């Protein structure tokens, strides 16, 4: 079982099943398809809480996110480059839809890809391209 932590503003989207994926940096051990995931808010704090019951991992893909300042200029998943419309859809699926965020975390653009770019700039100030993994899960109520 592998645990992942999330910012508080993602929790309602995970609970509702809107957000079913996360982008993470490469590390020694990530979840594998079929393994159960534990999804937490406030991990390693006294306010830690499990967002949803354990959820099965349904996919782990290589991802490259290209950035220019606060903008996501490109995304590649398993070597397949996404179009501008696909990047917007990806950003929405990853929890950056304006109607879901409602300005949380200072993310107030009308475009999901811009919110995602601002989030990445705030949380990864070193800039440049990001290489990691895209982890997808099935919400528990659908897995049953």
Image (spheres, rainbow, N blue to C red):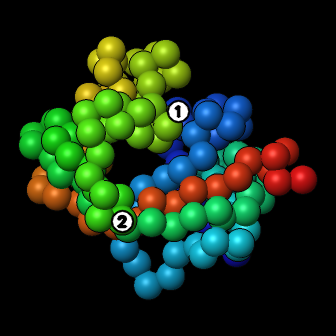
- Give me the residue at 16% from left, 58% from top: 129
Residue 131 marker: none
Residue at numbered disc 2? 78
Can residue 86 be seen here? The reply is: yes
Which is more N-terminal, label 1 or label 2?
A: 1
State the residue in front, 116 or 44: 116
Q: Measured along the vertical axis of the image, is residue 98 above or below residue 3?
A: above
Q: Secondary structure at mark 2?
A: loop
Q: Position of residue 40 (x, y in %)?
A: 64, 53
- Give me the residue at 58% from left, 40% from top: 19
Is residue 75 found left or right of 78 in the rendered image? left
Q: Position of residue 144 (x, y in %)?
A: 90, 53
Q: Measured along the vertical axis of the image, is residue 78 above or below residue 39?
A: below
- Give me the residue at 32% from left, 38% from top: 87
For label 2, count other residues whose C-alpha is less than 10 Å away and answer few (under 14), some (14-19) or many (20+): few
Is residue 78 found left or right of 129 in the rendered image? right
State the residue in front, 110 or 53: 110
Q: Residue furthest bottom?
A: 28
Q: Position of residue 105 (x, y in %)?
A: 39, 29
State the residue in front, 52 or 78: 78
Residue at numbered disc 1? 9
Measure the alpha-carbon separation of dots 2 and 1: 28 Å
Q: Residue furthest right?
A: 144
């Amino acid at each position: 079982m592998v645990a992942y932590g999330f910012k508080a503003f993602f929790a309602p989207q995970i609970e509702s099943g809107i957000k079913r994926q996360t982008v993470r940096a490469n590390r020694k051990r990530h979840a594998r398809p079929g393994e159960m995931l534990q999804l937490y808010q406030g991990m390693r704090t006294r306010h830690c809480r499990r967002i949803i019951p354990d959820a099965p991992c349904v996919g782990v893909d290589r991802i490259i996110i290209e950035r220019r300042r606060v903008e996501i200029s490109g995304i590649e998943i398993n070597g397949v480059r996404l179009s501008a419309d696909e990047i917007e859809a990806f950003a929405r699926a990853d929890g950056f839809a304006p109607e879901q965020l409602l300005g949380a975390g200072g993310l107030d653009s009308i475009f999901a890809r811009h919110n995602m770019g601002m989030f990445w700039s705030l949380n990864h100030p070193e800039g440049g391209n990001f290489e990691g993994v895209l982890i997808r899960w099935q919400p528990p109520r659908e897995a049953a």
